[in-house]
Amino acid sequence: MFYRENGQFKSSYAADQQMLPILQDRVFMLGLLLFAFAAVPFLASDYLFLSILIPFLILTLAAIGLNLLVGYCGQISIGHAAFMAVGAYAAYNLVLRLPQLNFLVVLVLAGFIAAAAGMLFGIPSLRIKGLYLAVATLAAQFFMDWLFARVKWFTDYSPSGSVSTATIEMLGWKIDTPVRKYVFLLGVLVVFTVVAKNLVRSHIGRAWMAMRDMDVAAEVIGIRPVYAKLTAFAVSSFYVGVAGALWGFVYLGAWEPLAFNLTLSLNLLFMIIIGGMGSLLGSYFGAAFIVVLPIFLDQVPAMLGVPIPTAINSHLQSMIFGALIVFFLIVEPQGLARLWAIGKEKLRLWPFPH
Amino acid sequence: MKKNWPVLTLGAALLVGLALPLATGASAPGFYVEVLLGGLMTGVLYSLVALGFALIFKASGVFNFAQGTMVLFAALAVARLAERMPLWAAILLAMAIMVALAWLIERLVLRPLVNQEGVALLMATLGVTYFLDGFGQIVWGSDIYKIDLGIAKEPVMVLDKVFQGGILVNKEDFVSAIVAAVLVAGLVLFFQKTATGRALRAVADDHQAAQSIGIPLNRIWVIVWSVAGFVALVAGVIWGSQLGVQFSLSQVALKALPVVILGGFTSIAGAIVGGLIIGVGEKMAEVFLGPVLVKAFDLAGGGIENWFAYVLALLFLLVRPEGLFGEKYIDRV
Amino acid sequence: MKAKIVLLTAAAAAIGSTVVLAQQAKEQFFPVLSYRTGAYAPNGIPFANGYVDYLKLVNARDGGIDGVKITYEECETGYATDKGVECYERLKGKGPTGATVFQPLSTGITFALTDKSFSDHIPIITAGYGRADSVDGTVFGWNFPLGGTYWDAADMLVQHVGKKEGGLDKLKGKKIALVYHDSPYGKEPIALLELRAKMHGFELLLLPVTSPGVEQKATWLQIRQQRPDYVFLWGWGVMNSTALKEAVATGYPREKMYGVWWSGAEPDVAPVGEAAKGYNALVFLAPAGQGQIHKDIIKYVYDKGQGTGKKAEIGEVLYNRGLVSAMMGVEAVRRAHIKYGKKPLTGEQVRWGLENLAIDKAEIKKMGLEGFMLPVSTSCVNHSGEATATIETWNGSKWMVGSDHYAADQQIIKPMIRASAAKYAAEKKIIKRDCAKEAG
């Protein structure tokens, strides 16, 4: 009833090309942003911030990054946590060695360094593809795990190999409380989402999608595979690298190379599968799902008043998690984003479906 | 012949690398042989897991990430069942469980996902991995268990007349090598000589054509997954007897992934040869190249074998994208 | 839809019940970070069982700590840092006064929690693990590496092999290999060993093993090639038993292998059994065996069907270590009751108890822990207490505890701690505590 687009006419190209062409969507988005920026900081508890919202925001950013590569360009990477590690260690070293830099500059630089690493490991994609490529990307994972554990310079010769960060300070603004961390991350995420949204609508994004849908045809219409694939690897790694820097600095505070291991890579992959490949919105859904699900499952038995031993609970979680992935692949291969789209379609017709 | 020069160059480079420690005197000959043997033995174990990967990929086009977990699951089953019954009975019962598992996977996962692209199937097996990890630990427990094959673990010194210091070998290693060889021979016979084996190969070549001549696809898949379960069981028993049966067993399977990309996803011979190449390559690299790197770059210890296997595999892929023995249908980009 | 309603009501009920819990007074909340799953489960399970059993015992036998009942909640970390941080955030605010003390049993998690402790004011006990430099209470205000750190452990091992050689100066020209878990845990002792190597002129060989540690063939081939005089094993979980198996396979004498105190439990040697005979490990708190306390646990906990683990596993090394670790937390609360009164205490108040621990021989006997631990006394400046340990040897079926006691040479370690803590304080811009002022 309220979600109708008839009567909204576009009278300029600019209007036709805006990100959210439907008025209701714009109003909704505005409301959502207002809520996220202005209301949530006053409503949520510290636990909600530290254990759910902050990891959610950072992982969403990482999931968007991976989605650009897998969902939009069709190149699978099982080792993307490696580039998170690159971002995190790059940021650590930049802060350590150039302390006068603003943290935002550090973030961007860390992103660029991760992008360079991503391009390097993207080179095999020019020669192999599909599942071979997927397995080959594990090389990045294991190499980076090794690199940061063994080359002492990266960890500033820390005897334990673990690094820890001081509180971030930008222009006199200390990001120390959970609320400030949340607002900062939300700001970063919004900016990066807008950039990503525009990127995938631009010629680069279209080149990626052409590459994904049919590489030979894409080549025929003049898209250079080298260009398309390597930019996808670079941009994706940039996003993931920034997410990694945030993961280290804002969420963990102190970390070791194991913090960016294969499990994290797989989790990123699950996020975009469950959320929806090739959908930015899906990255949000997927990250939320993966962050919240284990925590939720962890607490279900206690909520229902049937305490089961933590070990059994954790095994059950693993089983449910696995079953859900299979379930999603079977029932809704396009993920939660597709469900959202279906809901929206239905809403258009509601309450008079005929 | 002209087209093959990258392959030849790479092969030559690797051989030179292999010979370098001996040539430069970095290693005593006896020790060199020991490392070589150690690499080969590790390689045999990688091959066993890689074999499972290759079998399933060949017949159903699924890259089965769950192979490692199947190894763990089978080993756990054997170890726990053996506490209550003789070992042979435990192995038989565990095999029955693996067949049941294969049937369930076919029913619940593969059949609904038929005709999906490879990536979706890979993801599905990741789901299976998580499920089996949890399920296995609930059913069998998450402690460390023993499988005792009754083979002596103390090493034997051989050839101490030929090489200074002699060469240490383990009976256990040789038993596993023989078992692997028998297994491969058996599988080859099974694929070449039996009707089921021929049906399996037909399915591997062309699903639709196989179906149209009356080969029941679903049953073939159950068989293939059962065979993979059997290979997992053998790998699990051998590995379990050497390392102890414990959760980490499933992670060793990650080491088999470079083997399959090196050997080609569909090739049984590739899985075996690839396993040996990776096994030898990474042990050689770790023992001889590792210390050099550590000294040169002031590293905090070597440990390069984890990624070296992948680098080796990637090098091969760059010159031969379809893997060592893989079929050439993989379109180049 | 129906399922949704059920879930929502459940969630509402859960929120409601936590509110109710928070209002109940006279309860001291102990968070339990455990790992009963994954690669390290064989070691995490007995430790967690001992830990929880002790808390249960205090409730069942004494009715709590001085009448304040203990509540606890377990959270599964899987030995992963991010999971541990989530557990910490979840549990830190529970109970009427918040979490009493955290004991993560993971050096990696300890590193992450240390940063949080400065703002959350909840002590972290890391009995026999964690950061070596956190002994310095003026910088690390909330860490308590009670009973010894890895620097202490490494130092004691060097002393032991020195003694075997007939004097530390005899170590000149010898070769010692450190086979370590490639994580903060395994890397901690390196700094001290390097220093000692320089002092005595022995060569140190560093051989990292990637987690979880089932792949050690190359490591042991290197040992076979280099033929070190001694091997120090800094492993955890399945890495230990694998190391022993590979040592057997490469023919390295087990008598020359020395494990840290986390490499000397039953799951480490049992899979190798007879072949591991001769292998040694440090033992600081809690060797294997049963004493008065175990009888109490069986009587008050297990016989009532409240036991956490299997009855047969009571008294294993890691079980006992969990027991003693829990005891330290409980005793800290008891100690703090003297100053703040017998009521639920906050983390900050418990810290006072931890900084004023004085568990002497009589006290240990009274608790029924005779033979399972050595006296511990701490202060605001020294958060660890005296570190002493003995060497145990596996005889093929049982751990035999040796008679030599070793104490780490604080002349060497103290300056290292001071330097490292000062560096940390500078990096993190931490203002040092003035212990003299706080006491006055």
Image (cartoon, coloured by chain):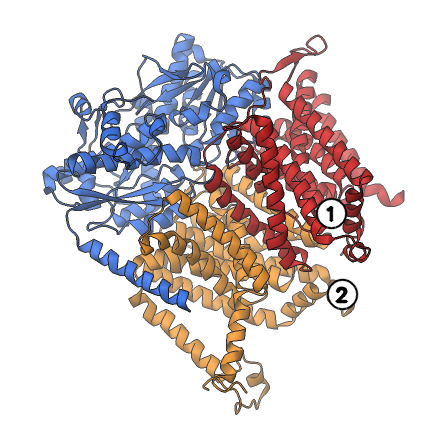
Residue at (89, 44) in percent of width and height: B2
Colour for chain B in the figure: red
Instruction: Name the residue beneath numbered marker 2.
Output: A219
User: Is residue C40 positioned above or below C406 on the image?
Assistant: below
Q: Amino acid at mark 2?
A: Glu
Q: Nearer the viewer, residue A94 or B12?
A: B12
For the C terminus of chain C, the quadrant is top left
Horizontal and vertical percent position of residue B173: 64, 23
Q: Amino acid at mark 1?
A: Lys
Q: Is residue A334 found left or right of C385 in the rendered image?
A: right
Q: Nearer the viewer, residue A205 or A27?
A: A27
Q: Nearer the viewer, residue A194 or C13?
A: C13
Numbered disc 1: what chain?
Answer: B
Residue at (31, 39) in percent of width and height: C103
User: Is residue B154 positioned above or below C39 on the image?
Assistant: above
Chain in blue, by letter, is C
Residue at (52, 48) in percent of width and height: B131
Residue that lies at the very extreme toward the right in this rendered image: B1
Instruction: Name the residue beneath numbered marker 1.
Output: B58
Horizontal and vertical percent position of residue A5: 52, 87
Tell me if mark 2 has few (under 14), some (14-19) or many (20+) residues whose alpha carbon lies within 10 angstroms of its own. Answer: some
User: Is residue B314 positioned above or below C262 on the image?
Assistant: below
Q: Quadrant of residue B272?
A: top right
Q: Nearer the viewer, residue B331 or B108?
A: B108
User: Is residue A68 positioned above or below B124 on the image?
Assistant: below
Chain in orange, by letter, is A
Residue at (55, 39) in percent of width and height: B73
Horizontal and vertical percent position of residue B10: 77, 38
Horizontal and vertical percent position of residue B110: 64, 54
Q: Quadrant of residue B100?
A: top right
